[in-house]
Image (tube, rainbow, N blue to C red):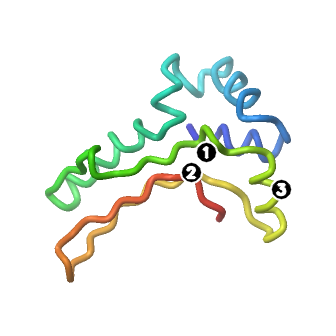
Amino acid sequence: SANVVLTKMNDGGVSLCEAMQWAMRSGVVGENRNNFCDGSDVLAQLSILSKIAFGAPISSETVSCGGISKVTRKDFEFARRFEATVKFLGVVQLNRDEAAISVYIAPAIV
């Protein structure tokens, strides 16, 4: 859902607020957009996937979530200079050498 909003911002040249209003009218985003904007919904999903894939859930206290609430049109303008865009990523990786899980939840230029 976050990437649908980001795509609307990129393709339509609209602000996050305008893209969120469109997403809510379209049913892409539910009523609790705070979980959506701050990345906590992605953290909950990654915790489930991590438990299934690696046998270990992710603790919300140990993960810094960067949601889409601070993404602006200028971010897209900057990304276009590199023929890229902004997407919201939620990544969980197992580092076998350290027997640790690393988590990345934030907007990124891709």
Left or right for 59, reference 64: left
Nearer to me, 48 or 81: 81
Q: Amino acid at mark 1?
A: Asn
Q: Which residue is mark 3?
A: 77
**Residue lying at 23% horizontally and 59% vertically, measured from the top left:** 53
Return the disc, 2 or 3, that comes first in the chain's sequence: 3
Nearer to us in this view, 6 or 74: 74
Q: Sequence-wise, which precedes: disc 1 or disc 3?
A: 1
Q: Give the image quarter of residue 110.
A: bottom right
The quadrant of the rendering that contains the N terminus is: top right
Residue beneath the point at 33% across and 67% down = 93
Q: Earlier in the sequence, mark 2 or mark 1?
A: 1
Depicted 4 relative to depicted 49: above or below: above
Tell me, yes or no, whether the two marked residues, 2 and 1, touch with CB atoms within 8 Å: yes
- Compared with residue 41, is residue 30 higher up or lower down, i.e. above or below? above
Q: Total of numbered circles in the picture?
A: 3
Give left or right: position of 110 versus 61: right
Residue 20 lies, with reference to residue 59, above or below; the image says above
**Labels 2, 3: front one:** 3
The amino acid type found where label 2 is placed reads Phe
Q: Are marks 2 and 3 in contact (CB under 8 Å)?
A: no
Mark 1 closeness class: few <14, some 14–19, many ≥20 residues within 10 Å: some
Q: CA distance from mark 1 to mark 3?
A: 17 Å
Residue assigned mark 2? 88
Task: Residue 3: give its label.
Answer: 1
Q: What x and y, as percent, mark residue 23?
A: 66, 26
Disc 3 secondary structure class? helix
Which residue is farthest left? 55
